[in-house]
Amino acid sequence: MMRFLSIVLLLSSSISFTCAGEITDQPKVKIEYFFQTGCHDCENVSAFILPQLEERFSGRYELHKYDTGTKENILRLIEIQNRLKIDDNPTVAMILNGKIYLGGFDNINDKLFDQMDKCLAEDPVKTPAASTGVPPQRTFSPAAVMLAGLADGVNPCVFSTLIFFITLLLSMKASKIKLLLAGGIYCLACFLTYLSIGFGIFRFLKLFSGYHGLQTALNVILFVALMLLAGLSFLDAWRFRRSGKAESVTLQLPDNIKSQIRSIMHRGLKYHFLLPGIFGIGVMVTVLESVCTGQVYVPTLILLTRETGLASKWFFYLLLYNLMFILPLIGLFLAAVAGTSLRSLLALSKRNVVTGKILMGLLFLILSLVLLRLI
């Protein structure tokens, strides 16, 4: 249990928040960002312009967001337009230091960064960050992403499926070289497929980055779901420890999906070209297992969408998560190649149910606490 507590403390410390009252000596540009919920140009600004702004000018600006769906905010925008003698009505606009007006996505995209440089060169008055009213930036550290991926990788669904696959390979009297090749191709297929799934989900979630009402609702729903999953995970660990029967576990793959996975493995190993068949097995099994593994993957991706930075930073996090996810699978294959008996692997799978469920429950609790700070 001490090992689990150390993991919790490490993961908790990996998710840090900057201090809202920090005083900065750097000049800052005040940016007033006016947008409409559901506006396509606003979504593009949030998804593409704001990350670049953070990457290039982190700590050098104050961003104030105003949803023009409210009366107060639209009146504020009209007042600024009248003062600056602006006669247009774009769906999205930015005003820098109260005097530089950029209306429409194209205008913002073309001129924002040049205007930022000019404003910073003017050396505006230095202001405490606490006076801006802007909430502190959230930081989801690489260590937190790594631990989440590793916890997902020891998911009992993944472990039991992989041990079944190794059993089939051993029953074919595969040599160590063939077993090593099969394991490498299977793990590569799982890695690429899971990475593709995550990238697709992440891009879909980023489309809603400008819908603050929807984001809040999603955070509330996800918080409740994570608390429920945490409770069920701990309950599963307790039930399985007492009974030792898979039927006592609530959070597991449905029987029909398990049957499909086993059928796919049997058919794939009979394919004339064995190694391509194994790659196909890895792809299809990963897609089917995502019903179970997505319990950790999706909440992590939702938290990552709150991160600022360029797409390269998000993709790095996705790679990091998936590399950690695949490590336990590689470890199992290497153990089989090293001569670990099937009996030992089955015993490991059984022990992993309790360990994996407790670890998953702790991770669900931590993610729910992080989400609670975002609601």
Image (spheres, rainbow, N blue to C red):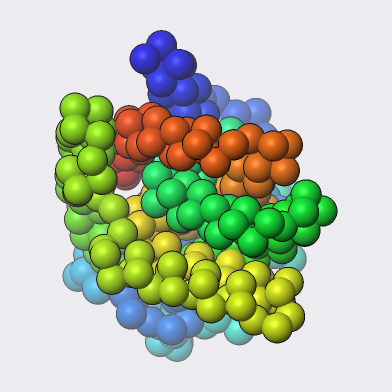
Judging depth in this view, the residue of 360 and 156 nearest the camera is: 156
Judging depth in this view, the residue of 236 and 37 nearest the camera is: 236
Judging depth in this view, the residue of 218 and 242 nearest the camera is: 242
| Place of residue 346 in the rendered image (x, y in percent of width and height, measured from the top left) | 46, 39
| Place of residue 203 in the rendered image (x, y in percent of width and height, measured from the top left) | 51, 71
Going 53% across and 78% down the picture, which residue do you hit?
267
Quarter-wise, where is residue 34 in the image?
bottom left
Q: Is residue 356 visible?
A: no
Q: Is residue 264 left or right of residue 360?
A: right
Q: Is residue 73 left or right of residue 243?
A: right
Going 25% across and 34% down the picture, which residue do you hit?
244
Quarter-wise, where is residue 240 in the image?
top left
As drawn, 250 above or below 238 = below
As drawn, 268 above or below 116 = below
Going 63% across and 35% down the picture, which residue do you hit?
340
Q: Is residue 271 visible?
A: yes
Q: Residue furthest top?
A: 2
| Place of residue 90 in the rendered image (x, y in percent of width and height, measured from the top left) | 44, 85
Q: Residue furthest bottom?
A: 88
Q: Is residue 245 left or right of residue 91?
A: left
Q: Is residue 224 left or right of residue 1?
A: left
As drawn, 156 above or below 179 = above
Q: Quadrant of the N terminus?
A: top left
As drawn, 360 above or below 47 = above
Going 64% across and 61% down the picture, which residue do you hit?
172
| Place of residue 199 in the rendered image (x, y in percent of width and height, measured from the top left) | 56, 67
Judging depth in this view, the residue of 196 and 72 nearest the camera is: 196
Q: How many marks?
A: 0
